[in-house]
């Protein structure tokens, strides 16, 4: 199973020089878990940088994976990871989702560097 952090989604949608690194984890839909917070972050960024249509297209692509909503159990676990690893709120939710499903987390975000089951690729 794979969880793709917002930074990696944005790289993929931008088609930048790092997008190929994240492509397989994103395009293997049957193994893709999408924390709902990543949809928020990606939609907001694309809306700000481009327009609503582009943001909606990105969201539609993300929804092809299994969207994982934030519930009470995941919220509490995310809070523990946030304190333990010094993660910001959204990152702690994304990491908790990956850990809950024993998934690999794909990212460019240095907040995740060195954490268990994280595939980090610097920008």
Image (tube, rainbow, N blue to C red):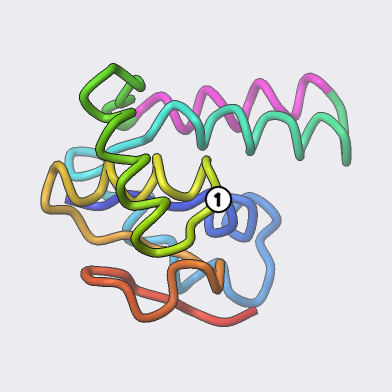
- Type of secondary structure dominating the magenta stretch: helix
Instruction: Identify the residue shown where x is 23% and y is 61%.
Output: 104
Q: Residue 18: percent from the left, percent from the top?
A: 58, 74
- Residue lying farthest left? 102
Judge by depth and name the residue closer to the eye, 10 or 40.
Answer: 40
Q: Quadrant of the C terminus?
A: bottom right
Q: How many marks?
A: 1
- Left or right: 111 with respect to 46? left
Q: Which residues are magenta?
A: 52-64
- Left or right: 3 with respect to 63? left
Can you say whether 63 is above or below 46 in the image? above
Q: Residue 82: percent from the left, percent from the top?
A: 41, 51
Instruction: Identify the residue shown where x is 26% and y is 30%.
Output: 74
Instruction: Identify the residue shown where x is 76% and y is 39%.
Output: 45
- Residue lying farthest front? 83
Magenta-drawn stretch contains 63? yes
Instruction: Identify the residue shown where x is 59% and y is 57%.
Output: 7
Neighbour class for label 1 at 10 Å: few (<14), some, many (≥20)? some
State the residue position of label 1.
Answer: 88
Q: Quadrant of residue 19?
A: bottom right
Can you say whether 8 is above or below 117 in the image? above
Badge 1 element: loop
Judge by depth and name the residue closer to the eye, 71 or 54.
Answer: 71
Judge by depth and name the residue closer to the eye, 45 or 65.
Answer: 45
Q: Residue 111: percent from the left, percent from the top?
A: 52, 68
Q: Residue 110: percent from the left, percent from the top?
A: 55, 73
Can you say whether 79 is above or below 65 in the image? below
Q: Quadrant of residue 68?
A: top left
């Amino acid at each position: 199973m794979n969880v793709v952090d917002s930074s990696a989604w944005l790289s993929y949608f931008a088609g930048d020089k790092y997008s190929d690194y994240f492509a397989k984890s994103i395009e293997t839909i049957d193994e893709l878990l999408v924390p709902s917070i990543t949809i928020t972050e990606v939609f907001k960024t694309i809306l700000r940088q481009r327009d609503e249509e582009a943001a909606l297209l990105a969201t539609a692509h993300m929804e092809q994976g299994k969207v994982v909503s934030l519930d009470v159990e995941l919220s509490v676990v995310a809070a523990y990871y946030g304190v333990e690893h010094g993660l910001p709120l959204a990152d702690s939710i994304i990491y908790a989702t990956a850990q809950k499903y024993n998934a690999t987390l794909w990212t460019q975000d240095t907040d995740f560097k060195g954490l268990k089951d994280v595939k980090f690729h610097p920008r």
